[in-house]
Image (cartoon, rainbow, N blue to C red):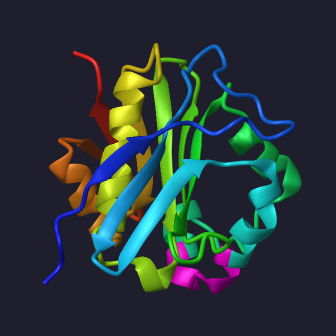
């Protein structure tokens, strides 16, 4: 039987070289621990630029379906320029998740990035296929929405776009009270209010 999931905040590590921490829109992002099961404990921390190779190795392990659900395209890798932007905490929050027993293996990347208009943050998540269906996506999504409330000073709502056939993500978003719209037959736009 799957155990209940939880996240425990931990101290924020020193900022890696070349990564901006605590920019104008966000305060420092804590590390967290996620218990997927008694034997599958993961750690999530702010992304650093030197994670790029491991992040792209994760992309290579993900199925075409998983990558398409995340990007709406068959992305095989992120470019250094894209990853540098995601690592800049002045523009948002990006977390990498690793198994506690194998901290060199990235199994998930979760992003909450500032958009125009500035009071919205766009959410995205990619989880390695072998770690899907165990509650990790639910836990990380809830955690990022909580960070939008507590660490994004001006965020009023979180937006997300996913495929209309991505039932796992749609279920997670509905449980968070997301308002759904269907701009096209293949995608769903979701909006989650974080300030009332």
Q: Position of residue 147 (x, y in %)?
A: 40, 33
Image quarter (top left, top right, bottom left or bottom right) of the C terminus: top left
Q: Is residue 34 something one can see in this rendering? A: yes
Task: Give the residue at x 78% y 41%.
Answer: 16
Pick whichever, 26 or 173, lies toward us: 26
**Is residue 157 within the magenta segment?**
no
Q: Position of residue 31 (x, y in %)?
A: 50, 45
**Type of secondary structure dominating the magenta stretch:** helix
Task: Give the residue at x 46% y 14%.
Answer: 153
Part of the protein shown in magenta: 58-66
Pick whichever, 17 or 117, lies toward us: 17
Q: Is residue 162 above or below residue 93?
A: below
Q: Position of residue 156 (x, y in %)?
A: 37, 20
The residue positioned farthest toward the left in the image shown: 1
**In which quarter of the view is residue 80 placed?**
bottom right
Image quarter (top left, top right, bottom left or bottom right) of the N terminus: bottom left
Task: Give the residue at x 58% y 83%.
Answer: 64
């Amino acid at each position: 039987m799957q155990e209940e999931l939880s996240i425990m905040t931990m101290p924020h590590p020193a900022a890696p070289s070349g990564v901006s921490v605590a920019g104008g829109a966000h305060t420092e992002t804590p590390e967290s621990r996620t218990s997927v099961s008694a034997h599958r404990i993961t750690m999530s921390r702010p992304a650093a630029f030197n994670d790029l190779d491991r992040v792209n190795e994760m992309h290579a392990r993900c199925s075409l379906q998983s990558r398409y659900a995340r990007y709406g395209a068959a992305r095989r890798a992120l470019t250094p320029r894209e990853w540098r932007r995601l690592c800049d905490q002045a523009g948002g929050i990006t977390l990498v998740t690793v198994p506690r027993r194998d901290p060199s293996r990235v199994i998930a990347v979760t992003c909450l990035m500032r958009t125009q208009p500035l009071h919205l943050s766009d959410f995205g998540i990619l989880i390695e296929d072998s770690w899907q269906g165990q509650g990790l996506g639910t836990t990380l999504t809830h955690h990022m929405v909580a960070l939008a409330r507590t660490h994004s000073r001006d965020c009023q709502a979180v937006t997300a776009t996913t495929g209309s056939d991505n039932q796992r993500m749609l279920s997670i978003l509905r449980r968070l009270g997301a308002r759904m719209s269907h701009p096209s037959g293949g995608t769903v736009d979701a909006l989650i209010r974080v300030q009332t």
